[in-house]
Image (cartoon, rainbow, N blue to C red):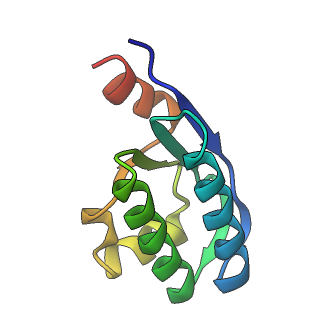
Amino acid sequence: MAINLKKLEPTGILDGATTNELKLQVSDLLHQDIDIVLLDMRQVTFMNSTGIGAMVAMLKIVRAKGKRIYLCGLTEQVQIIFELTKMDRVFKIFADQQDFETKVLVA
């Protein structure tokens, strides 16, 4: 059985406005035939607490639909935010897309 994966690549600063846009994109994807959303965060330069809150809301939406969401490529600043807020324990985070593919898609 093939897994339907959609990758999104947010860029710049993830705050209230930009994360709400990302949340809408993810919500739209859930109406399509996808199983997994992968957020490649390599180009996110900063994330604030509003961004984290919106990410958690996004996670809840995805899980409620019986789908999965993963993160990869966190920059050092974003990784620190995730660790400080303990969100690194809530989200499945991978070093990069290849790490994700090896551990999730091939497994």
What residue sits 38% from the left and 51% below the top?
A: 93
- Asked where in the image residue 91 lies, by quadrant, the reply is bottom left
Tell me: residue 8, above or below residue 84.
Answer: above
Q: Is residue 14 left or right of residue 102?
A: right
Residue 49 in percent (x, y) is at: 50, 87
Q: Nearer the viewer, residue 31 or 104?
A: 31
Residue 26 in percent (x, y) is at: 60, 55
Residue 58 in percent (x, y) is at: 48, 66
Count the numbered circles shown: 0
Residue 80 in sight from this viewpoint: no
Assign the C terminus to one quadrant of the image.
top left
Q: Nearer the viewer, residue 8 or 2?
A: 2
Q: Residue furthest top?
A: 1
What residue sits 38% from the left and 12% below the top?
A: 1
Residue 81 in sight from this viewpoint: yes
Residue 95 in percent (x, y) is at: 44, 43
Q: Is residue 107 left or right of residue 62?
A: left
Q: Is residue 45 left or right of residue 95?
A: right
What residue sits 46% from the left and 38% below the top?
A: 36
What residue sits 38% from the left and 66% below the top?
A: 60
Tell me: residue 9, above or below residue 88.
Answer: above
- Asked where in the image residue 48 lies, by quadrant, the reply is bottom right
Q: Residue furthest front?
A: 31
